[in-house]
Amino acid sequence: MLRRLALFSIAFLSLATSPLRVAAAGRDLSVVPTHGELANKTIYHGSYALLIGIDSYPHFPGQLQLQYADKDALAMRDVLIRSYGFPPGHIRMLLNTDATRERIESALSDFADQDKYTTDDRILVYFSGHGQTVNLPGGGEMGFLIPSDADVQFDHIDNAAPFLRTCVEMETVWSYLQSTPAKHVLLIADACYSGLLAQNRALGISPGALAAMASRRALQVMTAGGKGETSTELSDYGHGAFTYKLLEELKARASVGPGEVFTSSELYSAVERSVSNLTDGAQEPQFGNYKTEGNFLFITTAPQPTSATATIVPRPAPKPKTTARPLTKPTTKPGGANQIDAVVTGKIGDDLFDGRWRFKVVSIETAQSYNYNTEADWNTATRTLTATAGNTLLIVRCQVANGQNTKQTLWIANQGSNTSVTNDQGEAFPSCAHDFTGAPIQSKALIPGSKMLFPVVFAIPQGTVPADLIFTLRNNDGGKGSDVRVSLR
């Protein structure tokens, strides 16, 4: 199912971070940096979320029913509780027919209660469902969230009256969120919008500005795409494309361990690239501040249990087959190399983040011989790798970037590594060579933010159709490392 999008363009924000110590006490989360410009200062006392997921629209035709919006919201709930310090009792869920206009506006208005919320709190609002932009007769436009009980005219989509009567206007959403005493608010929407979502301010952020940014008020928004684009649900992944990559990024960052901190603008930067790659550029997530200059912070915690207090409300509307554009999914057949569990999966061109490194397959090609890079320390006589009889060489050109704020050394060695190319039967063909420019064969040091391009060469039987690349990202610290899986088809 496709969600129509008419979104907006905004300027990009970036922000440096400091290591934090996370201390959980009772029902609240306190965040206290251990050093740097925020040392010994509490950032948040309370973390609250409103999560809305609507598949079922009783007044809409069958082709406009969605498939995965409620699952999007439930998956977001789990990752916030498990890894980001949001207590289960601080999360309100509105799913399917429970997500009426009245209940959505009531939940939003609750955030204005000064007896419940303080300036040391943060609030995250997530919406997965339909949205609509209505053009006005005198020029301009109005944006709306579409609740489950909406009743609008599809043959006259620019008639604002039914939307005003039965939907939630975006300016109303901002009125509620501006009224909260909470210091930082982030609205994440996997739906359809226009430029009415945010009023952007261009802002340069220097590395020494974190204390000021953390103390300033923040009303921010991240959306699934740009104006005139289409937000896609993916049946292979069971989520909207935007939410799938958002969840993947949050889980990867949490896998590094507790006490890590990153900003909403950093999260957007990663998700924007990966969603664009996943949808072949058809969907470009957007981000902006609404009349503010602060930045919402995410802080990882030790894994917490996610008690099943939220369930999916039954869907009375008929469920059509998905009409989402097809997407190749990495092989998941049992047996052989396909049993290897990867931290993240994707396809050629996707930016995959395992919590430490960012990995991408740029291209693949076959050849009977391969000439080593002139700076590589291999076979000084001929610098040539040649396939033996019955085999061919598969050259996979990869990119690895340091995803941390400290220097890291990528370790490459076949021993203890799962790096290989697989076919549909689960057979695996290990690498013959990693052609690191100007580096020893087994390791490469990268400073924060830097990246390198390098080929990995495999020998595979002629006629073999490669299915996946499994690549082990491993630091030069004796650790096991993590595997990523990339579909090569």
Image (cartoon, rainbow, N blue to C red):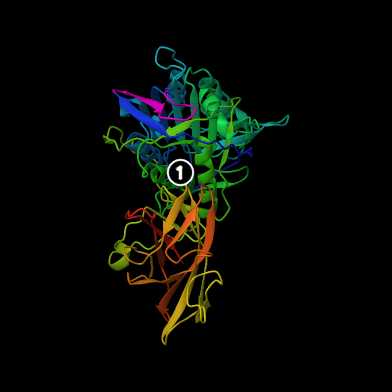
Residue 284 position, x and y percent, is: 57, 46
The image shows residue 476 at horizontal and vertical percentages of 38, 55
From the viewer's perspective, tell me whether residue 309 is left or right of residue 43.
left
Residue ID at (54%, 30%): 220
* Residue ranking furthest to the bottom: 389
State yes or no: residue 86 in magenta: no
In the image, 454 versus 60, the foreground residue is 454
Task: Please give the residue where the numbered disc 1 appears in the rendered image.
Answer: 246
Q: Is residue 334 above or below residue 153?
A: below
Q: Dot 1, crowdedness within 10 Å: few (<14), some or many (≥20)? A: many
> Does residue 375 appear anywhere in the picture?
yes
Give the farthest residue toward the top. 115
Residue 226 x, y percent position in the rendering: 60, 43
Q: Residue at x 54, y 46 (%)?
A: 272
Residue 37: in magenta span = yes
Q: Element at badge 1? A: helix
| Residues rendered magenta in the picture | 26-40
Confirm whether residue 68 shows in the render.
no
